[in-house]
Image (cartoon, rainbow, N blue to C red):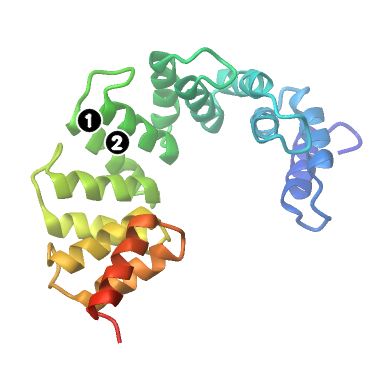
Amino acid sequence: ADQGDGDAQYNLGSMYGEGLGVPQDFKEAARWYRLAAEQGYAEARNSLGVMYHDGQGVPQDDEEAARWYRLAADQGLAGAQSNLGIAYANGQGVPQNYKEAVRWTQLAADQGFASAQHNLGVSYGDGEGVPQDDKEAVRWFRLAADQGYADAQYNLGVMYANGEGVPQDDKEAVRWYRLAADQGDARAQYNLGLMYADGRGVPQDDKEAVRWWRLTADQGHANAQLCLGLMYDNGIGVP
């Protein structure tokens, strides 16, 4: 890395950023990322952008984050394209522009980048930057969900539960909720509890409802805490 090898500099930055084999040190991570980034190393440019976005090891600066994302995105790096899409969607470091958000997100999604596929599904679901289209939303959610992306699994469950873009199917909703819930997604755990409480897509089971609500309540989910309180007050599904 000291000899200017971009790959080694990036790897050393990652080690400092994650505390692997060295004490975690965000300033050192940013320093090594910058050395690699200035040599045109795309992954380092994106990582330096993340450091600026998060204010880790460098002063928080969304414009600098977007600048580094763009340099890496122009090199075709899917993660940077996705990050730049998010920046445009939220107006962070760049003027808010949903069409630009979709353009960059699409480039990353077309490379199979799961979070971008999910975000593109959200854009179609909301009709932001593209015409509203539930079927397209489902298509992108499914691509990301099949890669194990929990947010997409949850959203696909919602689409099946509501019959949006797909035929209404409680069993399919439960299947996708469960996959996301097993990864710790609080919204999916809460919805899975509702499905058990109502007997939708699964046999009605108050104990299972309580089990899932307890998991999500422990994450601070207010509605789950409320449901759990009601179950205890009424002695339903609890010892």
Question: Looking at the rendering, in which quadrant would you find the C terminus?
Answer: bottom left
Q: Is mark 2 on a helix, strand or loop?
A: helix
Total of numbered circles in the picture? 2
Q: Height in image: 95 above or below 142?
A: above
The residue shown at (83%, 55%) is 23
Residue contact between numbered discs 2 and 1, judged by CB atoms under 8 Å = yes
Pick the residue in front: 61 or 228.
228
* Up-down relation of residue 154 to residue 136 (above or below): below
Q: At label 2, which amino acid type do we have?
A: Trp
Spatial CA distance of label 2 from label 1 is 6 Å
Quadrant of residue 124 within the rendered picture: top left
Residue placed under numbered mark 2 in the picture:
140
Residue type pointed to by label 1: Glu
Decide if residue 148 is in sight here: yes
Position in image of residue 51 (x %, y %): 69, 34
Provide the residue designation for mark 1: 136
